[in-house]
Amino acid sequence: RKEVEQDPGPFNVPEGATVAFNCTYSNSASQSFFWYRQDCRKEPKLLMSVYSSGNEDGRFTAQLNRASQYISLLIRDSKLSDSATYLCVVKVRVDTGNQFYFGTGTSLTVIP
Amino acid sequence: ETGVTQSPTHLIKTRGQQVTLRCSSQSGHNTVSWYQQALGQGPQFIFQYYREEENGRGNFPPRFSGLQFPNYSSELNVNALELDDSALYLCASSVLRNTGELFFGEGSRLTVL
């Protein structure tokens, strides 16, 4: 079983739509959670960290449910510039140090 | 610009050869991690270095090895290359005890023929 599972999509949505991405993780010892964004042929960049209390950054809202080992990202009022792949990331602390696990990524295309 | 630079950007090798990829981390960052990203997949964690010691390793065989230097720059070495090693190799720098944000370089695209 993969450490982090995401629906790869693709999600094709019109401008202005609201879209939600989900992610599950398998390791209950996971400590930190993130959403990264990766544009085509570019490196991943941090979009936002995810906290148990939920957190919002403008049009983006992230939620974490530790009991269900579930992470979500909600994008409101989608813009053309939101088109990218969104990667769910989990940091796990093990005896040998830290390990970061990335999901496969969910592809989003916002259509004019 | 993240301040993380990788070289070379592209390279082609044949099966059985060895490759060394290099990464200069962002100023002030003491931790470097390496990832393999195959086409259509998310980055897969190879290993992490902190203060020149390996500080975490993913599910990669020993022919994947690394180094971190006193200036926090790093190398990834892959021996006995296989066709499946063809991928984008990403380096990320960070500060070990911070929020966990990773700052990625643009990657080295390796093709194994």
Image: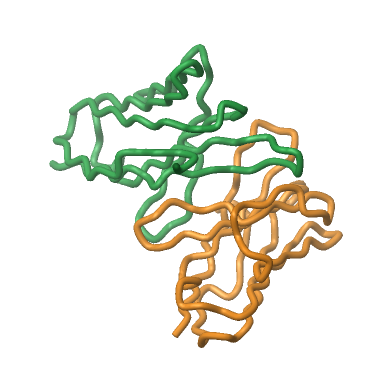
Indicate the position of residue A46 as horizontal and vertical percent values. Answer: 51, 39
Q: Can you say which quadrant of the picture contains the C terminus of chain A?
A: top left
Indicate the position of residue B27 as horizontal and vertical percent values. Answer: 74, 51
Q: Can you say which quadrant of the picture contains the N terminus of chain A?
A: top left
| Colour given to chain B in the rendered image | orange
Quadrant in which residue B22 is drawn? bottom right
Is residue B54 toward the left or the right of residue A21 in the image?
right
Indicate the position of residue A98 as horizontal and vertical percent values. Answer: 69, 41
Is residue B70 toward the left or the right of residue A65 in the image?
right
**From what the image shows, is residue A101 above or below residue B112?**
above
- Whether residue A19 is visible: yes
Foreground residue among A16 and B11:
B11
Number of marks in the rendered image: 0
The colour scheme used to paint the residues is by chain
Foreground residue among B100 and A1:
A1
Judged from this view, the residue extending furthest toward the front is: A1
Indicate the position of residue B61 as horizontal and vertical percent values. Answer: 63, 64
Is residue A13 toward the left or the right of residue A24 in the image?
left
Q: Residue at x 46, y 77 (%)?
A: B83
- Whether residue B26 is visible: no
| Colour given to chain A in the rendered image | green
Is residue B19 toward the left or the right of residue B73 in the image?
left
Quadrant in which residue B6 is drawn? bottom right
Q: Residue at x 77, y 64 (%)?
A: B67
